Image (cartoon, rainbow, N blue to C red):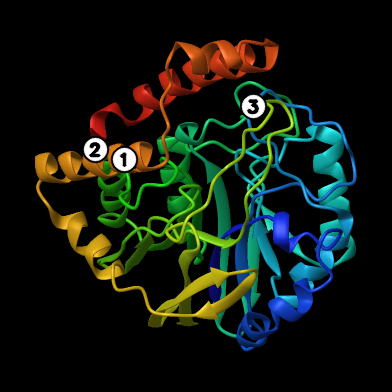
Amino acid sequence: MAFLGDIAFVGRFDLQQNSHVYENLKEIAGFLNTFDYVVANLESPITDISAADSYKAIHLKTSSLSVDLLNYLNIKIVNLSNNHIFDYGVAGFEDTINLLDKNNIEYFGVDDKELILEFENNKIAFNGYCCYSANGTRYKEESKSPYITPINIESVENRLKANEKNGYLSVLSFHWGIENVNYPAYEHIQFARSLAEKHKFILYGHHPHVAQGVEKINDSIISYSLGNFVFDEVLSTSIKGLKNKMDDNNRTSFILSLEINDNKIEDLSLIHIFEEDGRISIKGNPLFETYCETLYLSKDEYQNLRKEKLGEYLLNNNIKHDFSWFIKRLNRNFIEAYLRGRRNASIYNKMFNKYK
């Protein structure tokens, strides 16, 4: 079973803009087709709707043609619990579900939907959650169905207990963290480790758009962020000239490969990959060992390092939120997004305060 990071067929991966996408992905598609199951985070709705329907700076979507790329890459299971799946409203989300169903691609992470997979001597339960740190829209507490399933500590633990009782190995798909930082939040590390002290599971994370460390706690595998798998720069539809910039760090990620037998993880390997000009190739990452080692620093050392790296990213990308930045974005879209962000941050802090 292979686990992939964030997927959005945008930019150079957009079939409407680039006729060479299949050829460019041929090498990695061949590799993924050697797996029984490939699981990914589908970061964008698949729809041909043109008008975005949420208040944010960057909206993601891919055309209905791109569902064929999921099949080409042997992606049979996707998580939908993330901060972009409702970028084009409920209608865009429903287009996505219809296309996935027509193509026999399973999904989980919305409306508390759990995916049960039984094959050979394995029983696996997939659950997807979007953390309030990812600042999503249509969380369960604020919306009627359809909604994204939030990380609620009590709910996650109850799900793990129920799955263990019924003989299932749990897979947790967590959309969480801060973008463009290779070090997960300290409270996320503590939360994941506390779960692993009591339960057995596979946790794979996404949203930071860069690779983060992996650790094994007892019988559990915790992969904090797999980074991007298929992703590219996107122009904002609401703020003129704004786009999500990508560097080599964003183009470096890995595939989490697990061999599972009788609900036991018998083999684990990390396949590091790099995207260049739309081609994804297997390539080592000399920095990855450091990402793993830093997980074991003291609290103060770790948080200081993480703060330093975030500052370097902001400085290198000339990101500063001064008065001019604020005025350029002062519109209804920005105000709605700002208020939502404040609300989500408040819920998040209450939820994770005991792990800080």
Q: Earlier in the sequence, mark 3 or mark 1?
A: 3
Q: Amino acid at mark 2?
A: Lys
Residue drawn at (71%, 26%), measured in percent from left and top? 238
* Residue hosting label 3: 56
Q: Amino acid at mark 1?
A: Leu
Q: Which residue is mark 1?
A: 310
Query: Which residue, given by chain and number where applicable, does mark 2 sit on?
Result: 307
Q: Foreground: 114 or 320?
A: 320
Q: Secondary structure at mark 3?
A: loop
Residue 1 position in % (x across, y down): 55, 78
Q: In which quadrant is the C terminus drawn?
A: top left
Point out residue 283 in the picture as x, y percentages from the top left corner. 44, 80
When the figure is inspected, residue 7 is found, relative to residue 285, above or below; the finding is above
Can residue 256 be seen at all in this image of the molecule?
Answer: no
Query: Tag 1: Cα neighbours inside 10 Å, few (<14), some, or many (≥20)?
Result: some
User: In the visual, does 146 lie left or right of 281?
Assistant: right
